[in-house]
Amino acid sequence: MKFLVFCLIALSIADKFDQFRAFDEDEFGRTLIDTLQMQMSTGEPIGRFIEIMRNLETSIENEQKEDDKANNEYQSQCTEDIKVLQQESANLERRTVEIQSILDELEPLRSYKQGQADAKNAWKVETEKKLADLVKKRETEKAEFDKKVEEHDYATFVIETVRRMFSDKNQSFLQMNNESQWQKVRDYFINASEQAKKFEIKKSYSKMFNVFAEIANAAQTEDFQNSPTVNRIVNLCDLMLKQIEDSKSLETKAEQKRLNMFMLEKGNFDKDLTSLNNALAQLTAAILSLDNRIQDQKRDLSDYNARLAAKNKQSEDRGNECREKAYNYQLTREKREQKRQLVSQIIGAFSANQRDFAEYVKLRGQAGDFRGKNFQILGNPTED
């Protein structure tokens, strides 16, 4: 029955209490009305509630002023911190650009020096090959000359030996009969001809010795000591010795000329190789120095890039922190402003409709809901 009475009362004054009920729907407003209800329950003057509300409004405003000041100081510090961090980032970035600029100069220079070194090295390899070919050619020429000298000397030895048979009047040789003497001469030349067939260059000596052998063979019927063939052979020997000597002399002069040319060409190659080795040594040292400088610059660039990334991250984090702080400040300010407005509205509503407000609070308390939840439902006819 009591519940029904209150329902009827609530429905009859619903329109009059709409504003008060709106306060009660807000958690902070409900707390304020709870405070008023406590004030009324203790019998303290209603004016005391107004004083409390005004003090609360002033306190909220003072808190907001302090918060505004703290936020302004904090955001100013944020601006200064971010400015410093951005300047440090700019300095680091400028330094990375400077280092990259140095690398952009050093690396092409290093490539150019390496190209020079490669060209010099290729030239050196080609020069060494030419020198090796020249030395090999010279060795071949020297071996050929030595072989010619050897063959000349053998022919000279053979002819001089035969000539001495006729000119030295060797007793053992002269004591032979004619046939034995001529046969010995013939056999000697035949053996020499066979030996000369093994010659690599002067193969004509074999034919020449055969001619001597044939002459000796044809003179076997002649008296050796009075034979005209003896003088003929001696003259031929002298002639051949002269020709061999002349040929050897020409070969020696040609050999000397080849040797002189070889020494000249070898000297030029040696000079070129010395110059190339010096140039390569200088280029190698220059490339090594450039490699060290490039490595140092790359190390510095990596270090500065890492520092720049860290500084940018620090600046970004600081910016996020400041924005989050500003966002939280704005939320707090809005909530505080809502509370201040609510306090101001309650003060205004209470001052203008003190009797109705007191009646609302009284009915709210009689409904048995100190927090106002049940009364809120009863006082709102639109709720089930």
Image (cartoon, rainbow, N blue to C red):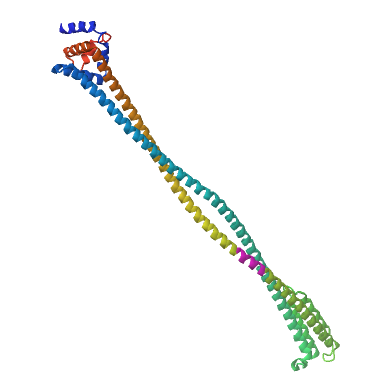
Q: Nearer the viewer, residue 167 or 114?
A: 114
131 to the left or right of 245: left
Which part of the image, by quadrant, shows the N terminus? top left
- Above or below, 221 against 280 in this view is below
Residue 187 at x, y percent in the picture: 76, 83
Q: Nearer the viewer, residue 153 or 7?
A: 7
Q: Is residue 96 magenta?
A: no
* Magenta residues (range): 266-276
User: Residue drawn at (64%, 65%), measured in percent from left and top?
Assistant: 272
Residue 77 at x, y percent in the picture: 36, 37
User: Residue drawn at (75%, 80%), measured in percent from left and top?
Assistant: 155
Residue 339 is drawn in which quadrant?
top left
**Residue 370 shows in the view:** no
- Residue at the farthest right position: 228
**Residue 302 shows in the view:** yes
Q: Is residue 271 magenta?
A: yes
70 to the left or right of 368: right
Which part of the image, by quadrant, shows the C terminus? top left
Residue 199 is drawn in which quadrant?
bottom right
